[in-house]
Amino acid sequence: MTFLGLLVVAATVFLLIRRVEVRLVLFVSGMVMASLAGKPLLIVDTFGKAMVAGVVAPICSAMGFAAVLTASGCDRQLVVALTRLLHGTGPWLAPASILVAYFCNLAIPSQAGTAAALGPVLVPLLRAAGLTPAQAGAALVLGASFGGELLNPAAQDVLAVGATTHDGSGPITALIVPSSIAGAFATAAAYWFFTARRLQHEPEPPKRLPVNWVRAFMPLFPVTVLLLSFAKVPGLVWLATPPQDPAYANVALGLPVVRAMLLGTGLVCALCWKQLQAISKEFFEGMGRAYASVISLTITAQCFGAGLTAIGLTESLLALVGSDRTLGVLLAIVFPGTLAMLSGSGSGPVLAFAQSLLPHLDDSHQPVRIATIACHSGSFGRTLSPVSAVVIYVAGLVHVDPRELLRHVLKPLLVGALVSFVGALIF
């Protein structure tokens, strides 16, 4: 039976590499494995249970808030505000541009969207500084896709992976924030060393567009109050305190995110009250898009994980890992990273890995650290993929072959990845 399961997993990997619809592949693979084990209803029941899982509320509210930011223009104000930081950076323009894109990705939960928002500003600036089109594009890819969105406590990957551990997404975020920021600064420094340190002149600074600083802060508001509440800052502890009513037990861990997103939405509505009807419509439509594009992926990933368990592969994998935490860490790096690089998707491989292994690990394996490393690995694998949306977009923007673009991405990304992985193990 285990051999048949391995064949199904091999077919799954092959189909994902061929870029067949991820959700279809994960669901069908789970159903095939469960059927071979004589438990086809397990997948149907898992599907139904996952549709109302606790992770649904925070992800949908976060995506609704992201839609509100776009409808109100607050995300564009943030981009303008961040590009102001590039004034006076001189020879540090290239690494500064990477960090601007990285922190912009924190508020814009899409790598291609971040690149599209910043590309028309950053690429001409970097080209004027003396970088080639491929080098300028590589800086944009590194910043937009290194994993800035993981800093957001409402990040879809963090919430979905956190749902597979006993402690939720909070401890994962607490590890991701320092390890990812350290990796981002290391990546920017490595890019400067390998690519940009020979720049001889500073370009004309970008035009100083007017900024509404209050609106520019709105994309960062939920993240800020969430992190402060998790740090138990007086006056904000209530935000991270779940209700004691048993009726909320299923969503208790996700309620702090929901509260922060609704507070942020309310503030944006107050600031942009003339657009109130359009903003409210976008909020609910954004929630619907979240269910269609994100929640559906978590549902099918759970079905795949249930199929692995039914056919005995999860038990075999746990027996292989045994008490060796090092092997668990290596699996968290290799499995999601390789599959993300081959498929161009970071979320699918990370969630498939999380559903397959994390729910079954005991505390001796430190599942929170393994979950953090898996999230990092998915981001890095996607960044090195010639078929990922962000790489394809930037390659088109600078008119170079994606492989030429990735040649300049490789070394800095490997340096940053190493720092992030080490940070996730020691922080």
Image (spheres, rainbow, N blue to C red):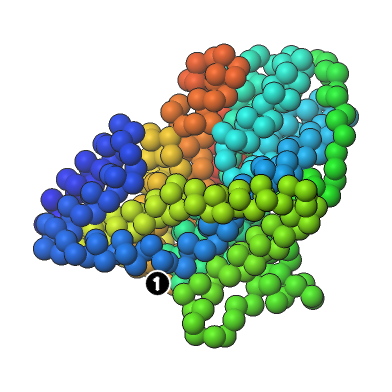
Q: Is residue 125 left or right of residue 195?
A: right
Using the image as rendered, state which of residue 266 and residue 377 is in the foreground: 266
The residue that mark 1 highlights is 362
Q: Is residue 325 left or right of residue 96?
A: left
Can you give x and y, in whole percent of width and height, for residue 133 in the image?
63, 15
Please report the residue visible at 73 percent of the width from the left and 18 percent of the height from the top: 124
Can you give x and y, in whole percent of width and height, for residue 63 in the image?
57, 51
Is the residue 220 above or below the residue 18 in the image?
below
Label total for image: 1
Quadrant where the image shows the N terminus: bottom left
Please report the residue visible at 72 percent of the width from the left and 60 percent of the height from the top: 266
Can you give x and y, in whole percent of width and height, for residue 73 in the image?
73, 41
Q: On the image, which quarter does residue 303 sit in?
A: bottom left
Quadrant where the image shows the C terminus: bottom right
Q: Is residue 371 left or right of residue 12?
A: right
Mark 1 element type: loop
Q: Name the amino acid, label 1.
A: Asp
Is the residue 122 above or below the residue 399 in the image?
below
Please report the residue visible at 87 percent of the width from the left and 29 percent of the height from the top: 208
Using the image as rendered, state which of residue 288 and residue 232 is in the foreground: 288
Please report the residue visible at 72 percent of the width from the left and 44 percent of the height from the top: 72
Can you give x and y, in whole percent of width and height, for residue 279 in the image?
67, 49
Can residue 9 be seen by looking at this rendering?
yes
Is the residue 54 above or below the residue 273 in the image?
below
Can residue 309 be seen by looking at this rendering?
no
Q: Is residue 9 left or right of residue 393?
A: left
- Neighbours of disc 1 within 10 Å: few (<14), some (14-19), many (20+): few
Is the residue 293 above or below the residue 101 in the image?
below
